[in-house]
Image (cartoon, helix red, strand yellow):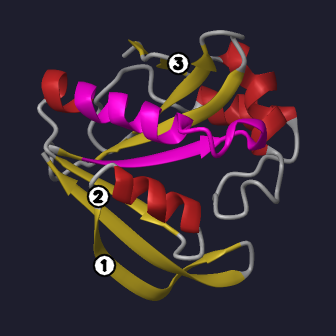
Amino acid sequence: MQLETKRLIIKPLAKTDAIELFAYRSNAEVNKYQGFIPCNLQEVVSFIEKLPGKFNVSGSWYQLILFEKNSSNVIGDVGIHFFSKKMDSVELGITISADFQGKGFAQESLNAVIEELYSKYGKREFTASIDPRNIASKLMLEKLNFTEQSFTKKAFELRGEWVDDLVYHLHK
């Protein structure tokens, strides 16, 4: 899957993107609600090597990288979880570099990915799981017409802390 929006080029994550991915994913403050905060470049390379080579593989996560068209800067990434039981459903996750947050890139990229998954791959159900303290993500998902589906108190452990989980849903 490779997409182009007004301001972005969205394509599969490759080993050649490891340094740029590490640059923003290793920032613990920016990624405090994320599960993956690499400590070194090798962790990023290992992460990329474990990704499936094919798109739309049942039970897998597939990672896309976001490039700003004007500068060719890597500005973030989108993860797509292809569920194994409900093949018309996916879970989405997104990370945007601190320098590019608050500029609409998350909404722009997710909108393009959702439209592609719907029109070309028949996906109709979209979910996003976030920490309820992540107000920016909540507002962005609501702008994309996601609605709150469920809330679970102390749903899982993240870096030694039990955190709540808020799941958003979109049906096309």
Cα–Cα span, label 2 and label 1? 12 Å
Left or right: 77, with 152 as reference point: right
Q: Quadrant of the N terminus?
A: top left
Question: Mark 1 sits on what residue?
Answer: 150
Q: Amino acid at mark 2?
A: Phe
The percent position of residue 20, horizontal first and vertical second, equals 77, 25
Please say whether residue 108 is one of the residues in the magenta stretch: yes
Q: Identify the residue at image location x=81%, y=24%.
A: 19
Q: Amino acid at mark 1?
A: Ser
Going from the N terminus, do you reach mark 2 or mark 3 first? 3
Per the image, label 2 sits on a secondary structure element best described as loop
Question: Mark 3 sits on what residue?
Answer: 8
The percent position of residue 165, horizontal first and vertical second, equals 47, 76
Query: Which mark is drawn over residue 135?
Result: none
- Which is nearer the eye, 149 or 81? 149
Cα–Cα span, label 3 and label 1? 31 Å
- Which is nearer the eye, 44 or 149? 149
Question: Mark 2 sits on what residue?
Answer: 146
- Which is nearer the eye, 36 or 100? 100
Q: Which residues are magenta?
A: 90-116
